[in-house]
Amino acid sequence: MKHFLKETDFSRQQAQQVFTLAKALKANRLNGPQPLNMQSWGLLFYKSSTRTRISFEVGVNELGGFPVVLNSENTQIGRGETIADTARVMSRYLHGLVIRTFGHEIIEEFAAHANIPIINGLTEFNHPCQLYTDIFTVLERISPDAVDIEALRGKKVAFYGDCASNMANSWIITAAMFDMEIVLAGPQQFAPGQAVADALKADGLPANYSFTTEAAEAAQDADILYTDVWVSMGDEAEAEERRARMLPFQVTPELMQLAKETAVFMHCLPAHAGEEVAQEVLDSPQSIIFDEAENRLHVQKAILAKLVECATPTR
Ligand code: CP
Ligand code: NVA
């Protein structure tokens, strides 16, 4: 069974097909194919969400399917039913399942026991739907006709703040997958960890990312400046310390000045103006944050369609 738990679950060629399809679906939003016709897809959330929840619910609907939105606490998971049994039971009703949860091992356990496709809607380790969307949003600008992944080669990403976060891990893996350069800038104790190094190794990807504690160094000649919240869901107990330590890594207009003239500012959202990014940067013409948010819909529809295609026996 094909799942989408990490960026590399699709080959480069399949990723290209996802981006090409996303472009077509975006151009023809309400009159496109309906590969989820008569299917019911679960959307299971252990954590809050605005974009992931809405874009998947709308996306499943637009592809002809029926979304079943579930909060883990209101299911029997909240009262201790095992993941294995939950996955087996859900597989009897649903045609696929999107999960947002805490530990990555939870989603891996679902995938191990389900016989329907599982999509990762964010774990503590990564956020692949966001990254595919971010890459598509970049491609729309640098390769608008073909959204050709070859156009990504050599593009420089500067990632700021919590460089051990799910978004940082996803960017490190995606940059390696598409031959991009990535420099991460943050406090030493939030440097990329062993888990992402192990994931690169497991996928045979080069570990050619670099980390600096100098914010300005990362921005030099960058094509993309990217940041994420300093306090991820689950990290609330460390909020004060994180805010104090990460303050030198706020994305400011001065940092943007060091990047290429054509550079864009990106953020998965939600944003906290005055923390990880200055309000002026969010509001600047270089900011493409709402294109990113919109594209979650189109790209995830393409991911759903691709997984359904992979699950359909060819005879
Ligand atoms: N970027 C993102 O995943 O947003 P939500 O937490 O609102 O889903
Ligand atoms: N790093 C953030 C991403 C939110 C979309 C979090 O996990 O809360």
Image (cartoon, rainbow, N blue to C red):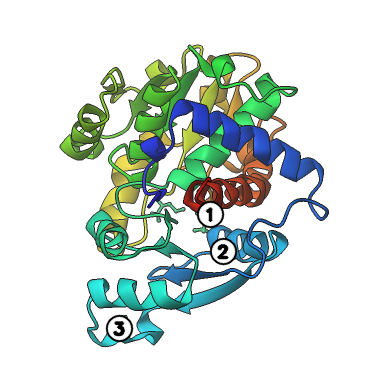
In the picture shown, does residue 234 fall above or below 299?
below
Residue under the point 26% across and 77% down: 85
In-front residue for pair 129/22: 22
Frontmost of labels 3 and 2 is 3
Give the distance between the C-alpha atoms of the residues marked 2 and 1, in whole angstroms.
9 Å
Give the distance between the C-alpha atoms of the residues marked 3 and 2, in whole angstroms.
21 Å
Give the distance between the C-alpha atoms of the residues marked 3 and 1, in whole angstroms.
26 Å
The residue that label 3 is drawn on is 78
Residue under the point 61% across and 34% down: 19
Asked if the beta carbon under badge 1 is closer than 8 A to the nearest atom of ligand 1, the reply is yes
Residue under the point 43% across and 57% down: 117
Q: Position of residue 217 (x, y in %)?
A: 38, 16
Task: Inspect the image, locate mark 3, and give the three-letter code of the amino acid beneath it.
Answer: Gly
Total numbered labels placed on residues in the image: 3
Nearer the N terminus, badge 3 or badge 2? Answer: 2
Q: Secondary structure at mark 2?
A: loop
Nearer the N terminus, badge 2 or badge 1? Answer: 2
Is residue 289 shown to the viewer in this render?
Answer: yes
Q: Which mark is residue 270?
A: 1
